[in-house]
Amino acid sequence: MQAEYDLIVVGSGPAGRRAAIQAAKFGRNALVVEKGRRVGGVSVHTGTIPSKTLRETVLNLSGWRERGFYGRAYRVKQDISSDDLRHRLLKTLDHEVEVLEHQFARNHVDTIMGAARFTDPHTVEVTGEDGERHLVSAKAFLLCVGTNPFRPDWVPFDGENVLDSDDVLDVNRIPRSIVVIGAGVIGVEYATIFSALDVPATLIEPRDTMLDFIDRELIEDFTHQLRDRGVTLRMGKAVVKVTREDGQCITHLEGGRVCKSDMVLFAAGRMGATDSLNLDAVGLTVDHRGRIKVNPATFQTEVPHVYAAGDVIGFPSLASTSMEQGRIAACHALGEKAQKPPEYFPYGIYAVPEISTCGMTEEEVEERGIPYECGIARFRETSRGHIMGLDSGMMKMIFSIKTHRLLGVHIVGEGATELIHIGQAVLNLKGTLEYFVENTFNYPTLAEAYKIAALDAWNRMPRKG
């Protein structure tokens, strides 16, 4: 490790790793500072990879995907324990860390484990777990420190019965019932994952709606699926307090209503992990959630040689977009050419069922005053859907009536996060309805839904001439 670098990246999550490797590809000296015990950041250790691994394990062991054929009582494993869930999780995390360490090594990216703190605009002090300190300097910095769960004082977190979204990955038992506070992406994902384990789940949200950036028709379908399998939704009611009484968790709502459960998961927001960086020394400020403001085209902060990317800058807070943000930021910081972020990127919510969306929602199209038509395909209409035993799931496509251009694709159901990429490609290439009508899709596949939805829209389109 040297004393001065072209780029110092604080945090080794998706944005940090991509930025550091991109810098190395340019032949520049890059250092990654990671305060955890292993590289990977929140994405690998408490966020994206663990939650998705947990989801996959639950779906496999519970037999969820086969219940359309064999009934709701079908199980692959009758008694699923927390050890069953943790076994696959640890294997997956070990593999992810090994891959990342190898990428850093073969690209000659230096790493140092410890907490970074600015001492002046071009220098950070890194303090390791053993107390050893290192001073390192750089021409440019990229802050990819991620976020921590928001933990309000009135919630009695204990890591066993009342949890945040990091704690939930270390639970030593499967709860008999669970209340999830917060119907954002994380809350919805965990509520539905536990529901797939046949754990009675209650989802509480102070707003009257959830996931407002998703097309409303999709959310209506998703909500129907949740209620159909017994998930209780308490919308428009804020939580006043959480207490423990007689071995149970009691969640008190506005108006006097209470929800009793074996476990409570608080998943109402996250805070930028910026407290320990001493940003005053570099002249940076953060908002009330600890997030850093950046130029959305370059990810440059108010301080020209300091950049930020990933969850610490806020929406969309996706691993996929964070990777691109980190790469673009590294290019700009090092004076190399970089394209603008893509106009359309897919958003994936790994609930049960999955939700994925790309492009404009119907509400956005209406706001812009664009004449449009929609096409709908139900997964049960596809042969592949019948083979898989699917009785739910839908795809919605939105087209311009004037130009026939695809404006948005919205999917809820099995494989949604994989299927969305066909629509993403057509959107970014400015493709039209005719692409889906005239092209051949593998049969039988769920991708056939693209043709079904396109034909549905075409049948409604006004005929020219």
Image (spheres, helix red, strand yellow):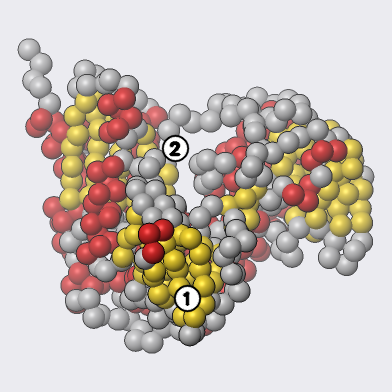
Q: CA distance from mark 2 to mark 1?
A: 40 Å
Quadrant for residue 372, please give it. Answer: top left
Helix, strand or loop at label 1? It is strand
Give the mark nearer the N terminus: 2 vs 1. Answer: 1
Q: What amino acid does circle 2 point to?
A: Phe
In-image side of 152 versus 453 (left or right): right
Locate residue 437, reporting x and y percent.
18, 34
Density class for disc 1 (Cα within 10 Å; few <14, some 14-19, many ≥20) is: many
Q: Is residue 448 above or below residue 302?
A: below
User: Are the residues flagged by discs 2 and 1 in contact, CB closer than 8 Å?
Assistant: no
Residue drawn at x 39%, y 69% is 258
Task: Give me the disc on residue 345.
Answer: 2
Judge by depth and name the residue closer to the eye, 425 or 275: 275
Q: What amino acid does circle 1 point to?
A: Cys
Task: Give me the disc on residue 59.
Answer: none
Locate residue 197, reporting x and y percent.
36, 75
